[in-house]
Amino acid sequence: MILWLVLFVAGALALMMMRAGAWTWLVAELAWIWIGGTTDQANAVVCILLAILLCVPTLLVAITSVRQTLITRPALDIFRKILPGMSATERDAIEAGTVWWDAELFSGKPDWNKLMQLPPPTLTAEEQSFLDNEVTQLCAMVSDWDTSVVWQDLQPEAWQFVKDKGFLGMIIPKQYGGKQFSAYMHSQVIMKLSSRCSVAAISVMVPNSLGPAELLLHYGTEEQKNHYLPRLARGEEIPCFALTSPYAGSDAAAIPDVGVVCKGMHEGREVIGFRITWAKRYITLAPVATVLGLAFRAHDPDHLLSDNSEPGITCALIPTSHPGVVTGRRHWPLNAVFQNGPTSGENVFIPLDWVIGGQPQVGKGWRMLMECLAAGRAISLPSSSVGFSKMAVRGTSAYTAMRRQFKIAIGKFEGIQEALARMGGNLYMMDATRRLSSLAVDAGEKPSVISAISKYHVTERGRMLVNDGMDVIGGKGICMGPGNFLARVYQQIPIAITVEGANILTRCLIIFGQGAIRCHPYVLKEMAAAADDDHDRALQDFDRAFFGHLSFVAANMARSLVAGLSGGLLASAPGPDQAAEETRVYYRAVARVSACFSLLTDVSMFVLGGSLKFRERISGRLGDVLSQLYLISATLKRYEDDGRQSADLPYVAWSVQDALHRAQEAIIDVLENFPNPFIAFALRIWMFPLGLSFRKPSDRLASDVALAMQTPGAARDRLVADAYRPDFRTDPLGSGEHAFNLLPQVHEIETRLKQSVKDGVLPAMPQSLIEMRRWNARAMEQGLISIDERVVLDDFAHYGDLTVQVDDFDAGFDMQEAVQKGQAPEIVIST
């Protein structure tokens, strides 16, 4: 009897996971009943009852005409009634862009081949040369301190360098005079600049992200491309794009700016155009822009263009010198001095030819913006966050390895190691996410959901990373000056959190709200069928989608239970030729959580229906689960792309275990706040039958990460790869890195002299690097070290001291005289 029942359960789970059709189920049910009858586990009456209970419903489903009459048609009627309303802008946002790996994570059974077949990120010889030379030269010209205190902008020679060297035309094809760099190269440039100076990064980022160049490339007329793209590539035009306003920030679709179709005079003749009134805020590069990209809501009350009096959002290019265009005074975003400010105009007439793409694109601006914004989100802000995070990790880890308290390096304190582990683990995952998202764009994707995940989670982890860095370096971090490598970043982090869609909105509405419809294999098909006016076609399409959906839910029910009962061992994972053995457990964990997430998503949509759209706490947490799965996927892909470097395993393990625990917490938070407690309880038992499986990274693992960050070598170099490393002779951050790289030699000398210290011949190496020079001299006088070793110790003491010291100024903080001279204030380091 037990074997017979086990056969039933095992067979049912197998058929669910295989998504077997109704006829297959019918054959399997009859075979099971027959086995029970022939082995005397069930008498004739029981067999008949089982056939009625199991086989008859299955037969009704198997016969298409019966199924559609009894089940599909009523289900379609109900679906049409409960389907939430959707505005045109919501539909455009949902349909914009493409789905990619995010759809696999929704499937409950990710196809790892799709991810692993994507080649590792590489640069062409031309791109690598530009990164090594022009980008490095620009980094050497600027600093956050000089731009904010002296110039309140990029200095003039830096601006000219940016224009002359083609930084503003990186995404423009070569036929128009641009660089035609890949998305990954674009990301590399922004990352490296951000590791040095936020103003330089943002000034380069904006023209190459959502703006006139990208919109022209995808939607512009040939005449518009031929006129503007060469001028943008040469830096003769400085572009900006005006979308948001105080009353329509993250809800950009609600922009109040209006353009009315009318006739007007342009260049001496009457033409059809728009009379536009706008008042935009927060527009980067607006104060210096020569060409303004403008989004406005088009009205055509006299039907001069078509029968549609409300065409919708439209995008146009307007020279800032055009009569009526008003460039306002600058904004000052948290001591960041990139050019940013308002632009406005009242009843400004522009010809129809200035609409991007001409008349055919009138009213299609929102779709244009959504598709272009997807690529920009995937590159710009994630890259800048990774850049300043690499700078923070470089400086903080070097500081903790050199700075001594209580006669030991502070990096050996467990509290410091805890913060360092978060910094290293987060950075490894952030950089992996940046790389994978850039590769998706290069592969031709317009990843709307993935770009939102990248923007939200990389900027948020960047904020946590810098906060940890500030906690570690303490007093040095709170004293402003050119020697403080974290202060400006710490001030300006909320900017990245706010722009291109505020992070709260991105998390609660975009990641899951858009993903649940676009990435789900059946929801969009069901919605399309329900909206079809052809009833026969709607019935056929809905029947396929609806029963496919039911099969999908059943498969994920089975997968989540089987994976839970097996501790993840029976979840899917890539083959040995695709993934390292040491990381296979993490692939299985992703597959398991993917099945649980997909099941929870479907149950939530079924229970909450259209109200899920407004249950932002639940949708935000569901989005968190999807996001963590993507971050883990990116991390595992990076480990493979980097050649399975075993020294990087602590970073991989810490970041993946942390993300799995976060995903598990998000699932539990959904269940604990689910409107139906009985369903929530059943789901928790079903998904976690052996209890909660995923734990936070252990203290031992955190120590391993902290040790790797404080050890000069290839593993640490990979962690901060391609970040700018300033000259150690002129820059405190560079001085710290130079002293840090001397540490192995210093430790070797100190170890050798321990016996001399123990015998009283030499005092212990002092904590103060200032006093260390006298210790070095005494050791040499006694013949305990060579001249070369004395040089190493003196260099370590000198450059390490420059790293530890803090900047000071005259009593009145009077920097005006130095600013007028175009110089940074004199910094006095007491030594």
Image (tube, rainbow, N blue to C red):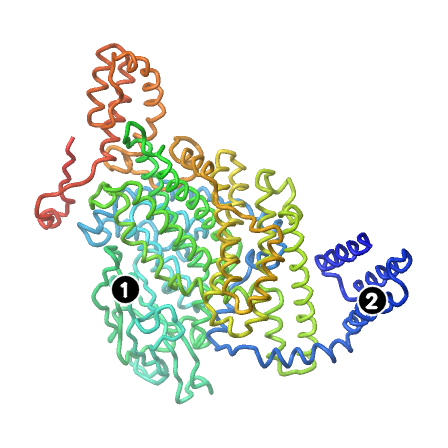
766 with respect to 218 (left or right):
left
The quarter of the picture where residue 471 lies is top left
Name the foreground residue: 33 vs 658: 33
Position in image of residue 559 (x %, y %): 66, 55
105 with respect to 759 (left or right):
right
The residue tagged 2 is 50
Position in image of residue 586 (x %, y %): 57, 45
What amino acid type should be assigned to the residue bearing mark 2? Leu
Whether residue 320 is situated above or below residue 799 in the rendered picture? below
Secondary structure found at label 2: helix
Question: How many numbered circles are shown?
Answer: 2
Quarter that holds the N terminus: bottom right
Position in image of residue 427 (x %, y %): 41, 45
Name the foreground residue: 762 vs 671: 671
**Visible residue check, residue 296:** yes
For the residues labelled 1 and 2, the Cα–Cα distance comes to: 74 Å
Residue drawn 20% across and 27% down? 770
The residue tagged 1 is 286
Whether residue 717 is situated above or below residue 186 in the rendered picture? above
Q: Earlier in the sequence, mark 1 or mark 2?
A: 2
**Visible residue check, residue 178:** no
Name the foreground residue: 295 vs 526: 526
Secondary structure found at label 1: helix
Whether residue 224 is situated above or below residue 66 in the rendered picture? above
What amino acid type should be assigned to the residue bearing mark 1? Ala
